[in-house]
Amino acid sequence: MSSGKPGVVLLAIDDDRKSLELIEDALSREDLTILTATDPAAGLEMVLQRRPEIVLLDLVMPQMNGIRVLEQILAAAPATEVILITGHYSAESAVEAIRKGASDYLTKPLSIARLRERVDALIAEFAQRRRALQLDSEMLQACQFQGMVGRSMLMLEVFSRIRRAAPHFKTALVTGATGTGKELAATALHRLSPVGSARFAVCNSSAIVETLFESELFGHVKGAFTGATEDKKGLFEYAAGGTVFLDEIGDLPLATQTKLLRVLETREYQRVGSPVPRKTDVRVIAATNRDLREMIDRKEFREDLFYRLAMVEIKLPRLAERKEDLPLLERHIIERMSATYGKPIRGIAPRVQILLARYSWPGNVRELENVLGHACMMCDSDLVDVRDLPEHLTESVCRAPAEDESLLPMAEMHKRHALRVLAAVRGNKAEAARILGVHRATLYRLIEERDPEDNRAEET
């Protein structure tokens, strides 16, 4: 075993001691700590204790199958890059290894140059990831707006509209599907307005009994109705000089809509049971996940009230429409949840990011918070993995149209493996053919391209 300054930790697991010695000699460098194990069980114990960034794993060992060891390594340390090494190459085993999560597949006898190149590339990637994490943290700060997070053009437009409207609005309408953050947008409008330090009173229209709407909004006097044993302030009086937020305005009864319209027009209201008019200076923000224009056509919502409320309209996009915001939202939520649960979670595994990006998010940002909150509670490492996610999400993504490579024809499996190798060597077809152990013309046939030499032969 050799070690250097603290940096990347590499673990080599191989029952052949000579292979381990070769790896140690070939990869010795100051910023790389090299651990070795001849027994898979001992290697797995090292994975748990040291959390190596890189594992070089022999595919064929008498004690345990390398694929099984690969699965256990990635279950314990999802961020670890595992490179499988074997003296018995086959396209089938290579495809299986990639499907199971291996990052590369090398053949024996090991090419020292190729091994160094791959490990050097991974070390450079880790350094780049560390820099990216720092940049992500800085970007997250730059892309937060009054509790909302986004860098997509759709969200930047939302932020811009809120900034421009906040100093001037008297009424505003926030629309969007459930879970898109309508209350956050309303709160931002209030905070950035001239009355941002005054009260922000919230009324959830869908949670109030119809007969009590007027009392909730405008208050009542003692004896106004059965049960009115004392005078009560309504939200308009409570929020004097501030803002009233009417959530789910589409659920407001028509009779109350009429009285709300009069208040917005005259800036006066009356407590239930009192003839005395009272002045109001509150700003009103309404929100809904319903199509008020369709409700107007069905005579379920007053057209004049709609136009009075929608002097400024802020439309919030669905999460599926701004998936470029997912990485920032994920980081924002993970940071908040890890602090809430007292866990040192630094992020999510790349395969989880891919899975989350494939999901349709019908519940929008609220569902994302629910999923990642669940994952952070279940997580027992510093990285959220697939096993930490709710079952409904992983099952939904798995049911989505996606090919299972194990069901593909062998020729297609070979083609896909060749394309992966080609991508790993950045399009160098000669190097890809050497790694695959085939002639370059065979590689061209595998990926269904014409060999340039064939084209030149035809031209002559």
Image (cartoon, grey):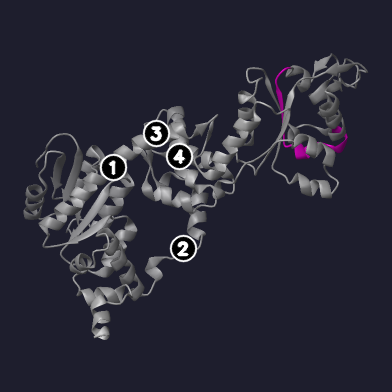
Give the amino acid type for the residue marked by disc 2 in the picture: Ala
Q: Earlier in the sequence, mark 1 or mark 3?
A: 1
Give the CA distance from mark 1 to mark 3.
14 Å
Q: At 44% from the left edge and 43% from the top edge, which residue is drawn?
A: 327
Q: At 46% from the left edge and 45% from the top edge, which residue is drawn?
A: 389
Q: Which residues are magenta?
A: 241-256
| Marker disc for residue 328 | 4
**4 and 1 marks in contact (CB < 8 Å):** no
From the viewer's side, name the closer residue of 443 and 39.
Answer: 443
Circle 1: element type: helix
Give the amino acid type for the residue marked by disc 1 in the picture: Gln
Give the CA distance from mark 3 to mark 4.
9 Å
- Image location of residue 221, percent across then percent down: 87, 16
Task: Quadrant for residue 18, please give it.
Answer: bottom left
User: For mark 3, what is the residue?
Assistant: 137
Give the amino acid type for the residue marked by disc 3 in the picture: Ser
- Image location of residue 422, percent across then percent down: 27, 64
